[in-house]
Amino acid sequence: MNIHEYQAKEILKAYGAPVAAGVPLTDAADAEAAAKSLPGPLYVVKSQIHAGGRGKGKFKELGPDAKGGVRLAKSVDEVKANVEEMLGRTLVTKQTGEAGKVVNRLYIEDGADIARELYLSLLVDRSVGRVAFVASTEGGMDIETVAHDTPEKIVTVAIDPDTGVTEADAGQLCEALELQGEARADGMKLFPILYKAFCEKDMSLLEINPLIVLKDGHLRVLDAKVSFDGNSLFRHEDMVALRDLTEEDEKEIEASKHGLAYVALEGNIGCMVNGAGLAMATMDIIKLYGAEPANFLDVGGGASKEKVTAAFKIITADPNVKGILINIFGGIMRCDVIAEGVIAAVKEVGLQVPLVVRLEGTRVAEGKKLISESGLNVIAADDLDDAAQKIVKAVKG
Ligand code: ADP
Ligand code: MG
């Protein structure tokens, strides 16, 4: 689950991280009061969408010469004018895709006098099984490019969970970021704070790009991106409350209501599979035969008829889906239950595209019999390879 920059900053501020004053708004009428509550004379108007690259982004409606999704303003009037221009417009950035995202919320923040822009993030480093800091002096820009062209400029410091951030770890990060004087003292305090927030809130990513050194020598968190581990949300009601459904894929929201693991993708073959491993294999084999999956969907080990029906509806509601492949291995899951779910769903929502079903495992004979007697126009398949070839052929015509 992702949250907005202003929400991430509120969390970090509560932990004691240096964050500027700012006010979120969704109504242009609030712009003047928001700006007047800040010290000035420099303000920043920041688009709040769940995507990065806002500064270099372009508003669809405003043409290529208009300013981007993060704008400096030198007076209250300039703040107002920018708010009017940005709110409700569609911002296209490197991360939004061509469709862009509608900016429903802006964050008016105190402007900073920036001396240096640094990169700092925390993530779960699976190769060492630890939370790690990633630091670079090359902040503010596309970190992927830095990692690709000049990997020596990126330093990783993995943290021992038994000790937390030690003086030595913090010192190493200060070296990596070339922090001296006040900035170094701020850094020594900031790193343990970020690590604590990351662990306590079960974050999967905390990215600060840029972390800045101000002209007065102090550090400040200027941008913040936070993602939470979805599997931990049951114990973080306060974080779940920060969820902004308008930023999420409708099909993914619907799927999460039914406890389905669903990720929307770009292709045109809808997949319904049980088990994440089998789902990955199914997507791979679709690609092998020259087509692209429209989604990842794992109905889980013990799915009910209702769950299967919900999954089928989500897949068929996607206009990109030109064919469906159901690939079930009945272990805990019984093939006849899947068959019943599919038949019920097709009766309810209809079937406009080819459907290939491959069933194997517990009660497979009963499952196949149910489908063949249902009168539905289903293409039966014997194994995964056969199923993939049949659906790709059906879709490609
Ligand atoms: P994004 O990463 O989505 O482009 P950022 O929050 O990193 O958005 O902002 C982009 C750039 O805008 C920053 O690298 C910084 O140069 C500038 N900027 C952002 N917030 C402020 C601020 N409060 N004061 C001054 N400059 C800012
Ligand atoms: Mg940024």
Image (tube, rainbow, N blue to C red):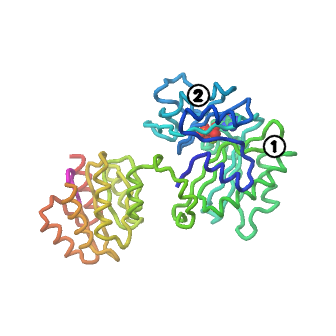
Q: Position of residue 389 (x, y in %)?
A: 26, 56
Tell which residue pokes out farthest to the right in this image: 181
Label 1 residue SS? loop
As drawn, is 98 to the left or to the right of 361? Answer: right
Query: In the image, which disc is placed on residue 183?
Result: none
Among the two numbered marks 1 and 2 on one chain, the one whose residue lies closer to the N terminus: 2
Mark 2 Cα within 10 Å, few/some/many (few <14, many 20+)? many
Which residue is at a point 77% across and 49% down the rendered structure image?
176
The residue to which callout 1 is attached is 218
Q: Where is ligand 1, by quadrant?
A: top right
Q: Nearer the viewer, residue 258 or 142?
A: 258
How far apart in space, not on screen, are marks 1 and 2 (Cα)? 29 Å
Q: Position of residue 28 (x, y in %)?
A: 55, 33
Whether the residue under disc 1 has CB within 8 Å of ligand 1 = no
The segment highlighted magenta reads 351-356
Which residue is at a point 34% across and 70% down the rendered structure image?
303
Q: Position of residue 175 (x, y in %)?
A: 80, 49
The residue to which callout 2 is attached is 82
Label 2 residue SS? helix
As drawn, is 162 to the left or to the right of 33? Answer: right
The answer to whether one can see residue 145 in this image is no
As drawn, is 183 to the left or to the right of 12? Answer: right
